[in-house]
Amino acid sequence: MRSADFFAGAARAEQLPPAKLPEIALGGRSNVGKSSLLNRLVRRQSLARVSKTPGRTQQINFFSINGTWVLVDLPGYGFARVPAAMQEQWRGLVEAYLRNRSALRGVVLIVDIRRGVEADDALLVEFLRHHGVRVLLAVTKIDKMARGECARRLRDIRASHPDLNPIGCSAVTGEGIGDVVRVLAGWLKVSLTSEGDDDE
Ligand code: GDP
């Protein structure tokens, strides 16, 4: 992908930018590896650092990709130390975004292969399903596990969530990233490969 630029952050629903291009959102628990996957997807080592700067971790961050579509980084959830009031704020903001965003083509939900789909993730899936939003389950950090164990866990996740099309991937080795990109391209109905890309 040729260019990726941060252009807006929203800490409150009123700050959500108008949707001018198709959007794909990335969501997951805090520390699941969302930033690493985002960087890998758009091939910008430091892109997601933007989302990690103080004051931005609790907001929805918008990145324009090649000027043709928008990658939306949802704030991580499920962090035990976050007070209830902030969890409510997260819910309000993220739900406001997900509920009526006609530009939204789908959500990539990221889970850690070692933890699978947890209660918080399942709630988000239920919400998205209710609002008719497509979900792709990216099961990341597969490099952390032996092949056989990895295959077994992926099989289990597939069996319990057949509609989420789980894809095993790793931001470290790049495995599975091409498969995720292909699904996103299908959602956007464009080719996301470009000169210089090698694993798509
Ligand atoms: P975020 O909080 O969800 O954005 O998570 P980060 O992308 O910051 O990743 C959290 C931690 O997991 C960091 O220490 C990363 O280096 C590590 N990490 C992320 N993705 C992978 C992966 O695919 N494999 C391995 N082994 N570690 C990863």
Image (cartoon, rainbow, N blue to C red):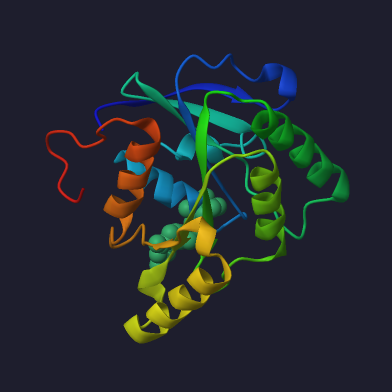
Q: What residue do we see at 19% from left, 51% from top? A: 199
The residue closer to the viewer here, 184 or 61, is: 184
Going by the image, does 52 lie left or right of 119? left
Quarter in which the N terminus is drawn: top left
The residue closer to the viewer here, 113 or 31, is: 113
The residue closer to the viewer here, 131 or 20, is: 131
Quarter of the figure with residue 119: bottom right
**Is 36 rendered above or below residue 58?**
below
The residue closer to the viewer here, 198 or 163, is: 163
Going by the image, does 188 lie left or right of 163? left
Q: Would you say residue 153 is visible in this rendering?
A: yes
Q: What residue do we see at 62% from left, 37% from top? A: 54
Q: Would you say residue 45 is visible in this rendering?
A: no
Q: What residue do we see at 30% from left, 45% from top? A: 182
Q: Residue 59: give x, y in percent of width and height.
A: 65, 33
Q: What residue do we see at 41% from left, 84% from top? A: 149
Going by the image, does 126 lie left or right of 138? right
Q: Residue 34: give x, y in percent of width and height.
A: 49, 50
Q: How many marks?
A: 0
Q: Which residue is most to the right? A: 85
**Is 69 rendered above or below residue 149?**
above
**Is 4 rendered above or below residue 186?**
above
**Is 21 rendered above or below residue 193?**
above
Q: Residue 174: give x, y in percent of width and height.
A: 28, 58
Q: Residue 65: give x, y in percent of width and height.
A: 36, 26
